[in-house]
Amino acid sequence: MKLTYLSHSCFTVETASHRLIIDPFLTGNPLAKVKAEDVEADYILLSHAHEDHLGDAVAIAKRTGATIIANYETALYCADQGAKKVHPMQHGGAFQFPFGRVKFTIAHHSSSVKTDNGFLFLGNPAGIILNASGKTIYHAGDTALFLDMKLIGELDSIDVALLPIGDNFTMGPDDAARAADFLNAKLSVGMHFNTFELIKIDPQQFVDKAKALGRKAKILGVGESLEV
Ligand code: NI
Ligand code: MN
């Protein structure tokens, strides 16, 4: 399958039969080169409800008819906002979709949207394990480092781990390199960096630190693809 980095935590995954987009934050994203109006998708996967992840999900779902896969509260929120098809999930649960299997894992973070009446908390943030076309991609969402990443790496042989490296809100380069090691991933790719001032880092640090632990990591340019 083809994995493409659209910037921040947004990736598209093209399987033989379906088009997926994860955390489609495009509008208002200074690094994004693709417009939400131009995205074609069959499924939209959301790690959590923060605006830099929920992003254009509802607009894309309304236009394309894509199904939104998210934690229970975020999925029903998207339905309230006008998404026609949503699929709620929770940590530890997996489901066989037409394109492959999705399992939600824990992530240490929060999940909310800001409304006129204050914050609306929408379930718990997740990581996403996608098994499709005989390969496994793990999108960690926004998270701190946690030791159970070792278990995630034991239960699934991870071909590509997508890890936040921008620090401040998530893991930084040191912890993300350790995550790559815990996960025993064949390749780790950095995400969630340099979009905003608070997460400006030198992403090469992540690659170098992972290498020092004997792990292969890389940074994709915006729009760059990998065959997984
Ligand atoms: Ni977040
Ligand atoms: Mn975020």
Image: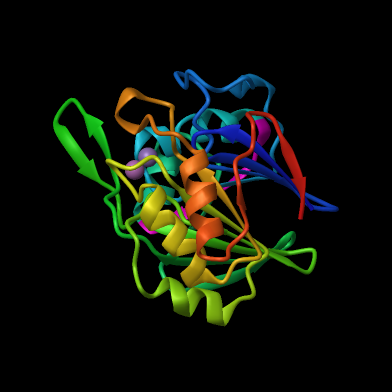
Residue 95 picture location, percent across and down: 59, 70
Q: Quadrant of the C terminus?
A: bottom right
Task: Tell me which corner region of the image, top left, top right, bottom left or bottom right, holds residue 221.
Answer: top right
Q: Which residue lies most toward the right here?
A: 16
Above or below residue 39? Residue 185 is: below
Q: How many badges with numbers are in the image?
A: 0
Q: Quadrant of ligand 2?
A: top left
Residue 127 picture location, percent across and down: 46, 59
User: Any magenta on residue 114?
Assistant: no
Above or below residue 97? Residue 217 is: above
Front residue of 184/119: it is 184
Q: In the rendered view, does 103 fall on the left or right side of 54?
A: right
Camera sees residue 139: no
Residue 28 picture location, percent across and down: 44, 18
Residue 49 picture location, percent across and down: 36, 43
Front residue of 153/215: it is 215
Above or below residue 214? Residue 48 is: above
First to last magenta residue range: 64-72
Residue at image location 54% in from the left, 81% down from the top: 154
Front residue of 195/58: it is 195
Front residue of 201/114: it is 201
Q: Which residue lies most toward the left here?
A: 117
Camera sees residue 65: yes
